[in-house]
Amino acid sequence: MALKFKAPRGTKDILPDEIAEWRLVEESFRKKCAQYGYREIRTPVFEDLGLFERTAGETSDIVQKQMFAVMPYGLRQQFEDERWVLRPEGTAPVARALLEHGLLQQLPLVKVFYIAPIFRYERPQAGRLRQHHQCGIEAIGSLSPLLDVEVIALGFDFLMSVGANGFVINLNSIGCLNENCRPRYRQVLIEYLKSREAELCEDCQRRLQTNPLRVLDCKEEGCQAVVKDAPISVDFLCQDCSEHFETVKKGLDELGIRYELNGRLVRGLDYYTRTVFEFVHPKLGAQSTVLGGGRYDGLIAELGGALTPGVGFGCGIERVLLVRQANSQTKLEDTTVDAFIAIASPVAENLAQKLLYELRAAGIRTDRDYLGRSLKAQMRYADKLGARFVLILGEDEMRDGFVTVRDMQKSEQWREPFDKIVSTIANALSERILTKT
């Protein structure tokens, strides 16, 4: 029979055999964030369109091309004034939530992290899905360049902790909105790009008038050739931004975190200021950025709050997993159960169910056969589940008051009294955990 439905293009089901890898990344990220003093925050999957128009910029690709609209099906005419979209990035929703709930007034520096699905309408390819998953951090409340260093260091430590090493950190400063800083650079860049406008792609010819810095980020070969000789932002930084950037570089040097200066690095969102960075991996091809972020000192003010500086990053979980795979990291396998109850006779059904409940109550992952299969078939299934122990119950066991225990790892077998089986299995599993630790 042919399948009637499949997952939408650009999305992916995460199947049980893959979950161990995802949990490694997510739990490692949570652990690393806790070490750095960041607390978790969760925001809605959809937000007001205006939030991203205001922060990402109305001329950004995210707003013009990549967002998914959300509205109640069949009631579209009634919801013209409520413009909801699936979140295309993580920073603006976090900033909105912190403002809405007054968290920025409770602490001088708010440090939070998130793990969330992100939605962008793009051409699907490896490491670039229409629904992908992102982990990120936001540190809001300080202008200190050493906070930039901390954010980059956290990203560095996290990727190293999950075996996603081999990346290169690209670093740049795009300055501030002081008239003697980025606006001056912007004008020089426009003049340069206009001199070679005919060589730019159609999108970049439009960007030249609306957001010329985005031309530096274009992946078209012709545009890359043009920007190769373009002026770079660090040559036009004001004194404050220059000193800020020097402190960031010195801080990373002192931590032994290597980086490469990339004068043409910009981020795809309008709210970035000063420090911007990307962790890129050579084995990922065109979509080589694993983690990226920077400073956004004007974002909170754009949302109606006081002028409050901030810095953070976002990291694609799918790309981290691709890097682990490219680095030939051992793929984790998560066993489903610790113990499996194999029923060799119908007379053991009720006892098997009682034992199943007692083992689970003791915190032991346990399952049993519900299909009436042969003992041999049950043993094969237990092995497929990765069960450490198989507990066999049949007529002999019922008569003698014992459970036959099979250690699947050691290929050993013995009999255990009914009243001791739970503690015996619990102790054996505890010893294994202590040994592994």
Image (spheres, grey):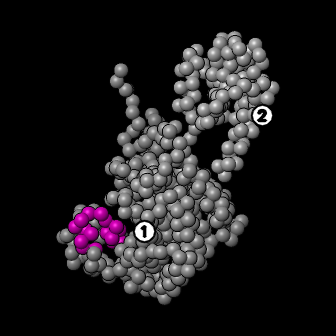
- How many marks are shown on the rendered structure? 2
- Give coordinates of residue 190: x percent, y percent: 30, 77
Tags 1 and 2 in contact by the CB under 8 Å rule?
no
Query: Relative to residue 412, is residue 121 depicted above or below?
Result: below
Residue sitting at 39 percent across and 80 percent down? 233
Dot 1: element: strand
Task: Indicate yes or no whether the magenta region holds residue 222.
Answer: yes
- Give coordinates of residue 414: x percent, y percent: 70, 27
Dot 2: element: helix
- Give coordinates of residue 234: x percent, y percent: 41, 82
Q: Which residues are magenta?
A: 212-227
Q: Is residue 96 left or right of residue 424?
A: left
* Measured Cα–Cα span from mark 1 to mark 2: 51 Å
Residue sitting at 72 percent across and 23 percent down? 403
Residue topped by disc 1: 168
Classed neighbour count for the residue bearing mark 2: other residues with Cα under 10 Å, few (<14), some (14–19), many (≥20)? few
- Give coordinates of residue 373: x percent, y percent: 56, 16
- Mark 2: which amino acid? Ser
First in sequence: mark 1 or mark 2? 1
Which of 90/248 is in front?
A: 248
Residue 211 picture quarter: bottom left
